[in-house]
Amino acid sequence: MTRKFLLIPWAAAIAIALLGPNEPFSSRFLLDFITYNTDAYEGYSLSLFSILGVYPLALFPLLWSEVNQLRPNPLLPAATGFVVGGFIIAPYLAFARQSPYPTPIKPLPTRLLGVLLLLVTIGLFIAASTTGNVAEYWSYVEKNQFVRTMTVDFFLLAFIQITLMNRDAKRYKMSLWPLPYIPLFGLLFWLIIRHKQPFNEAPPNRHKLK
C-alpha cells in the first residue's frame, strides 16, 4: 500500500466525523472519559478513549525508525498524534518526502512496551465487555461527534498501522503477514517480537560531490 493511499481513509474519516449530527455531552464529559466514569457513560466509548492513547504510543517506535527515512522529521506528528490521532499522522505519511540518503537508525527497544500495552489493551477490552452497552455505544456514534470521531480515528490508525508495519518489514527483510492487518493487536505482537530480529538495513552508497 503506497503512502498516498492514506489520503482516502483520512478524507473519509473527516467527512464522517464532521457531517453527522451532534448532541453534545455535558460540560464535564472529558473528565468523565479520563477517569473512566461508568456512572456517566457506557464502557465501550470509555475504553475506546483510552485505546486511542495506547495506539499512538504503540506506533511511536515505528515512526522513530523513520527519522532518517522521511522528511520532515516524523517525531512531531508522532507526538501530536497523542492529541489528534491519525488525523495528523495520515497526511504526514502521505506527503512526507523520502530522504535521498535514508541511513538506518537504531530501533527503540519495544518488548517491554509491547507487553505493557498489550496488558492494558486486554484490560480495556475486558472493562468494555463488562461495563459497556453496544446499542448505547452505537447511539453515541450516530448522535455525538466526539464518539463518532474517536471511532473513525481508530480505523484511520489501523490503516496507518498497515503502512508503517509494511515499511518496518522491509527494514527487517521479513514478511509480517497477517500482523499488519490485525488492528492494534497485530502491532502490539510485533513490538513484543521485534527486538529479536536483526536491524539489517545497510546505508546506501553515497557519491562524493566533485
Image (cartoon, rainbow, N blue to C red):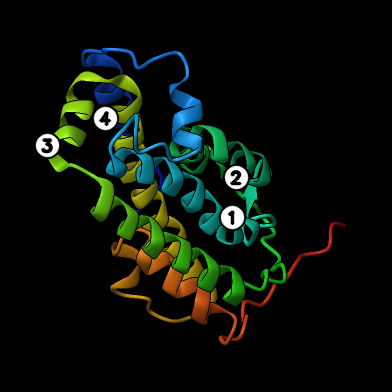
Amino acid type indicated by mark 4: Ala
The residue closer to the viewer here, 67 or 159, is 159
Residue visible at 66% across and 54% down?
100
Residue visible at 71% across and 67% down?
105
Q: Quadrant of the image for the C terminus?
A: bottom right
Q: Which residue is mark 1?
A: 60
Q: Which residue is mark 2?
A: 78
The quadrant where residue 72 appears = top right
Q: Position of residue 134 (x, y in %)?
A: 15, 42
Res 12 label: 4
Amino acid type indicated by mark 1: Phe
| Residue found farthest to the right | 210
Q: Are marks 2 and 1 in contact (CB under 8 Å)?
A: yes
Q: Nearer the viewer, mark 2 or mark 3?
A: 3
Amino acid type indicated by mark 2: Ala
Q: Earlier in the sequence, mark 4 or mark 3?
A: 4
Q: Which residue is mark 3?
A: 135
